[in-house]
């Protein structure tokens, strides 16, 4: 999510299948001067080396240390209200079984014969001394013991640190985003669903400029229960249907769709547009950001 001047949010979804090129640079990157705090959703990020699994990152703050809830400004408190009810409740459902299982005193034939044999989680704690050497042979030098266990849900600290540097470099930000505010996940479809689940409740609307990737309807409707609202080209435009500008989402077109569906919480953009391949100019993005800010609508930028 990108936090702009007050309450508008956006998110990036990128893919390692697309190398960073001048004509395909992150859509919101050209507007970074308007951004105060950054959070970026990036699927299959361009930082991943060839043949590595794709990842998705959600960054929450632009540099600096993480502030406690007591130090949140009134603007931050307002921003917290923009999340969905179910998104806020979801964190309450996070299981504690892994922490509970690891806190049990483990059996050892000599050091702890009275300990427990932990069978409640799929972690080979008693085989660590055998697994780590076996997995550390070349070309896997540097394999550490923590790699055989469950990882942090938000991603390993090392990859989140690398992601922070990638965002800093690619978006030309003044300072790197705080790695502690990054969350990684696999797959654009799943991450888009998870993100929109947290930003909107079932029945809320998602604006998508036409034409759009047909699978968005399944990704956001099947489980998240969101309503896809097409944004048609503006009624008045100087462009013809043969020009790319015909398909630029304007504040006029967005407002028309919004007025017909006032329960809109998200504006989903693709950049380049799927299926047209159209890249939005800076002035179009600024127009979109101004409109979204005025309506307190989240912006999600799907950048594959």
Image (spheres, grey):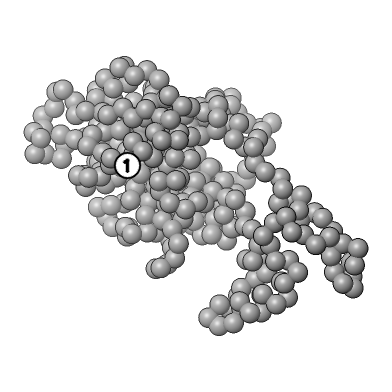
Q: Nearer the viewer, residue 8 or 159?
A: 159
Where does residue 138 sit, x and y in percent of width and height?
A: 55, 83
Element class at badge 1: loop
Q: Where is residue 219 in the image (x, y as percent from the top left)?
A: 39, 40
Q: Quadrant of residue 144?
A: bottom right
Residue, x 26% and y 33% (percent of image)? 209
Which residue matches tag 1? 215
Q: Which residue is drawn at 19% across and 35% down?
A: 247
Query: What number of labels is visible?
Result: 1
Q: Can residue 54 be seen at all in this image of the molecule?
A: yes
Q: Which of 3 and 137 is in front in this view?
A: 137
The answer to whether any part of residue 296 appears in the image is no
Local packing at callout 1 (Cα closer than 10 Å; few below 14, some 14-19, many 20+) is few
Residue 102 is situated, as x and y percent measured from the top left of the image, at 76, 56
Q: Note whether 205 is above or below 282 in the view shown.
A: above
Report whether 303 appears left or right of 124.
Answer: left
Q: In which quarter of the image is residue 282?
A: top left
- In the image, residue 51 lies at what x, y percent? 41, 68
193 shown above or below 99: above
Q: Residue at x 69, y 56 (%)?
A: 121
The answer to which of 157 and 136 lies nearer the viewer is 136
Q: In this view, does 101 lie to the left or right of 292?
A: right
Residue at 56% x, 77% y is: 140
């Amino acid at each position: 999510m990108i936090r702009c001047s007050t309450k508008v949010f956006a998110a990036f979804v990128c893919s390692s299948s697309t190398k960073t090129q001048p004509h395909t640079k992150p859509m919101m990157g050209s507007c970074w001067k308007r951004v105060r705090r950054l959070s970026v959703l990036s699927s299959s990020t361009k930082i991943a080396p060839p043949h590595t699994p794709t990842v998705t990152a959600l960054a929450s703050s632009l540099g600096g240390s993480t502030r406690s809830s007591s130090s949140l400004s009134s603007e931050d408190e307002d921003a917290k209200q923009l999340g969905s009810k179910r998104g806020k409740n979801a964190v309450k459902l996070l299981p504690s079984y892994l922490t509970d299982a690891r806190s049990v005193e483990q059996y050892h034939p000599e050091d702890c014969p009275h300990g427990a044999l932990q069978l409640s989680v799929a972690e080979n704690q008693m085989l660590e001394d055998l697994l780590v050497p076996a997995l550390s042979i070349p070309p896997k030098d540097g394999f550490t013991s923590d790699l055989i266990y469950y990882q942090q849900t938000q991603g390993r600290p090392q990859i989140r640190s690398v992601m922070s540097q990638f965002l800093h470099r690619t978006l030309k930000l003044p300072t790197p985003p705080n790695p502690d505010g990054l969350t990684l996940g696999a797959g654009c479809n799943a991450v888009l669903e998870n993100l929109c689940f947290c930003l909107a409740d079932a029945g809320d609307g998602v604006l998508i400029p036409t034409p759009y990737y047909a699978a968005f309807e399944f990704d956001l409707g099947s489980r998240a229960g969101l309503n896809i609202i097409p944004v048609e080209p503006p009624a008045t435009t100087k462009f013809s249907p043969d020009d790319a500008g015909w398909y630029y989402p304007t504040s006029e077109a967005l407002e028309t769709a919004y007025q017909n569906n006032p329960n809109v919480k998200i504006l989903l953009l693709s950049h380049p547009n799927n299926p047209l391949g159209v890249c939005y100019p800076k002035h179009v993005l600024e127009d979109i950001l101004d409109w979204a800010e005025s309506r307190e609508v989240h912006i999600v930028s799907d950048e594959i």
